Image: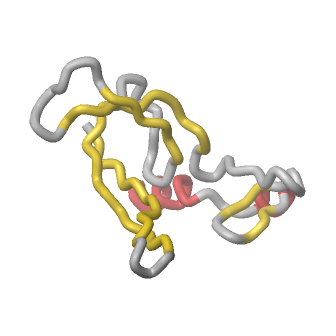
Amino acid sequence: MYAILIKFNVNFVFYFQYFPTKKDYWTIDYKDESKVGDVVVIKNLATSQGRRLNTFIDSLLFQTGNTIDPVTNRRCRGLDFVDEGDRENEPSKRKNIELTSAM
């Protein structure tokens, strides 16, 4: 069971503007392949599993670290582009954690 944060815009008619809002959903990940920061598709369950649990993760749209800009076809990390050569040369955080925990 995961907590998903949904960001969407709400139209305020009085101001003639859209304002960003957030809402939390509790979901089930049957495939257990999503991570923090992934962009996923959620769908409603056929039967509710509880008062708040009524959605599941259908598929992954973009995985964290595997986002490719459609215009330039280059990998992105946040708002910055990442070159493939630099990406291979930089040390992995996972390797550093394993090395420090082994000491």
Task: State which quarter of the image contains the N terminus.
Answer: top left
Q: Residue furthest bottom?
A: 15
Query: Residue 6 appears at what percent x and percent y?
Result: 40, 54
Point 31% across, 57% down: residue:
23
Residue 8, quarter of the rendered image: bottom left
Query: Residue 20 appears at what percent x and percent y?
Result: 44, 69
Q: Is residue 5 above or below residue 81?
A: above
Point 53% across, 60% down: residue:
96
Q: How many marks?
A: 0
Q: Is residue 18 left or right of residue 61?
A: left
Q: Is residue 73 above or below residue 80?
A: above
Point 38% across, 66% down: residue:
21
Residue 35, quarter of the rendered image: top left
Q: Is residue 33 above or below residue 4?
A: above
- Residue 81 appears in the picture as rendered: yes
Instruction: Give the colouring mode of the picture.
Output: secondary structure
Task: State which quarter of the image contains the C terminus.
Answer: bottom left
